Amino acid sequence: MKNRIILHIDMDAFFPSVEERENLRFKGLPIVVGADPKRGMGRGVVSSASYSARKFGIKSGMPISKAYELCPTAIFLPVNIELYQRVSEEIMEIIKKYSPKWEIVSLDEAYLDLSYVFYDRKKCSIKEAWEEVKDIAQRVKKEILEEERLTSTVGIGPNKLIAKMAAEKAKPPHQFFWCGGKSNGLLIIKPNQVKSFLEPLDIEDLPGIGPKTAEKLRVTGINKIQELKRLSKLKLKNMFGKMGEATYERARGIDEEPVSPEEVIKSIGKEHTFEKDTRDPEIIFQTFEEIINNIYQELESNKFRFKTIEVTCRFKDFETHTKSKTLKNKTRDFKTLESESKKLLLRFLIENSKPVRLIGIRLNIAYPSDSEG
């Protein structure tokens, strides 16, 4: 399809916002959803933080002890995943009404393919199409706000990449200024604006470029996407492999990935943070077996199969490593899951003598065909 219009919607600070909606006494207060801080002695991490909490420097993935240090008066709440899933389902039902092509990315994110606007009307000009899409976006946001009392941010662009980046830049509290006006939680980037939108941005704003990749680029004097575009595809491939080729395309706003009208759980995972760092194999493997059993129950209840097992081990001082194993055939076999996971964990313990802080398993789901049941 030549003319594409993709919408990306992202709920604002979803977990804390749901908690605030359910408990009006929390309104406006800094809310941190995650592990118990235990007065600064907690061992887990922050799952999500409200925007008022983020003003103190608190962010997702931060040690909960650090979050407590930054704002001890914040409201610290455990993750209530059942509640968030229930609310998410209601929100996604609203979103799905606006296009036959939708893709749910997570509990709080989804894509809509609105390209049909170009073709449903015989005399619809490109300008009129983009105006109609803007109206659709505003209606989606309004309906979610009225029905669920939750706010959302929308980015719209000619593909999924630009739509997602636009939504990120339209997020509160900073909100991106585009053409002299505030986004108000909605930012539209048309095809002829992609170049001027991307080039001034920091390289870490580009999906796929994390801190380590960025550090490698910055030492060569590359800090902005405009500077990144000076590197050839071959150069980037030599530096980062296949990811380098993808980065070359993304830096130019190129993304042909379709919006898939399926609700797909791409992976499932569980992890555990120990109360105290430990090298006791009995404690480590007993906990690991509990994780394996919990994941297997989820596999069975959803009739999922897996082909790749990834084990994470975080040592003292937050040194984190992952090891993975890809099987020849997809399976739901418990013994395979157990034996291969334990082999990966054992390699960590052999190669590194530091005390263990966290262990976890993630399975990449391989979806069976209809004939496989």
Image (cartoon, rainbow, N blue to C red):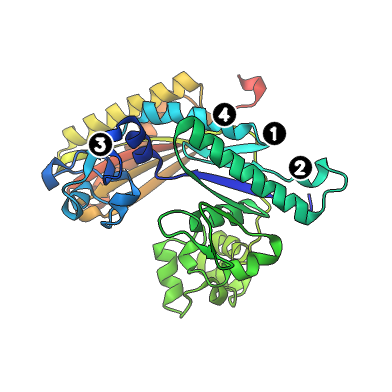
Counting from the top left corner in percent of width and height, residue 200 is at 53, 72
Counting from the top left corner in percent of width and height, residue 344 is at 35, 41
* Residue 173 relative to residue 317: left or right: right
Mark 3 touches mark 2? (CB < 8 Å):
no
> What is the distance, in whole Å, between disc 3 and disc 2 at their CAs?
42 Å
Instruction: Name the residue type under label 3.
Output: Leu
Sequence order check, earlier mark of 2 and 4? 4
* Residue 349 relative to residue 369: left or right: left
Instruction: Name the residue type under label 4.
Output: Glu
Which one is in front, 268 or 350? 268
Which residue is found at the position 44% from the left and 65% from the top? 213
Which residue is tagged 3? 77
> What is the distance, in whole Å, between disc 1 and disc 4 at their CAs?
12 Å
Under circle 4, the secondary element is helix
How many numbered marks appear? 4
Sequence order check, earlier mark of 2 and 1? 1
Under circle 1, the secondary element is loop
Circle on res. 93: 4
> What is the distance, in whole Å, between disc 4 and disc 3 at their CAs?
27 Å
Mark 1 touches mark 4? (CB < 8 Å):
no
- Vertical comparison of 38 with 173: above or below: above
Sequence order check, earlier mark of 1 and 4? 4
Which residue is tagged 1? 100
Residue neighbourhood size for the residue with mark 3, other residues' Cα within 10 Å, grouped as few (<14), some (14–19), many (≥20): some
Sequence order check, earlier mark of 1 and 3? 3
Instruction: Name the residue type under label 1.
Output: Pro
Which residue is tagged 2? 116
Instruction: Name the residue type under label 2.
Output: Tyr
> What is the distance, in whole Å, between disc 2 and disc 4 at their CAs?
19 Å
Which residue is found at the position 68% from the left and 37% from the top? 101
Which one is in front, 290 or 205? 205
